[in-house]
């Protein structure tokens, strides 16, 4: 325990300084939490946008695969190969080829 008045004043100054530091840190924490929430919102938007682009790229790739198959068939004499393409008009995903028997 401090005995002199000077020691008490020194302790009170230290407590005041520490309280000011705590207040400053709390304010910084609030700012960081707000910034983090904003970044999470932006990240969520970007993820949605990327997901949309992935779907578009997937559809484009399927279309290009389909075009590539058509070009291969046109290049070869496909009537002689017996290759036939079965495709659902609704869904390019179900495109497949098979050999005629």
Image (cartoon, rainbow, N blue to C red):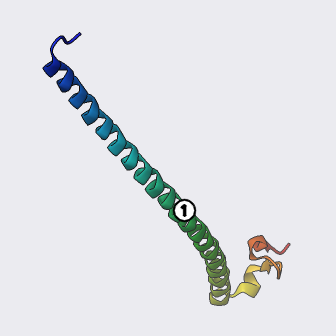
- Looking at the image, residue 14 sits to the left or right of residue 74; the answer is left
Quarter of the image where one finds residue 56? bottom right
Residue 47: give x, y in percent of width and height: 56, 64
Whether 65 is drawn above or below 17: the answer is below
Closer to the camera, 29 or 70? 29
Whether 57 is drawn above or below 41: the answer is below
For image coordinates 54% across by 62% down, the residue present is 41
Residue 66: give x, y in percent of width and height: 68, 80
Residue 72: give x, y in percent of width and height: 63, 83
Image quadrant containing the C terminus: bottom right
For image coordinates 22% across by 23% down, the residue present is 11
Quarter of the image where one finds residue 93? bottom right
Instruction: Write down the residue under mark 1.
Output: 41
Give the structural element (helix, strand or loop) at label 1: helix
Residue 61: give x, y in percent of width and height: 61, 76
For image coordinates 62% across by 72% down, the residue present is 52
Q: Residue furthest front?
A: 5
């Amino acid at each position: 325990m401090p005995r002199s008045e000077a020691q008490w004043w020194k302790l009170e100054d230290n407590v005041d300084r520490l309280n000011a530091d705590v207040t400053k840190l709390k304010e910084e924490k609030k700012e960081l939490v707000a910034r983090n929430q904003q970044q999470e919102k932006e990240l969520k938007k970007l993820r949605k946008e990327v997901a949309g682009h992935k779907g578009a790229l997937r559809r484009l790739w399927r279309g290009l695969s389909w075009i590539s198959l058509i070009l291969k068939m046109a290049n070869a004499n496909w009537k002689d190969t017996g290759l036939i393409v079965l495709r659902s008009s609704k869904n390019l995903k179900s495109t497949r080829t098979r050999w005629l028997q």
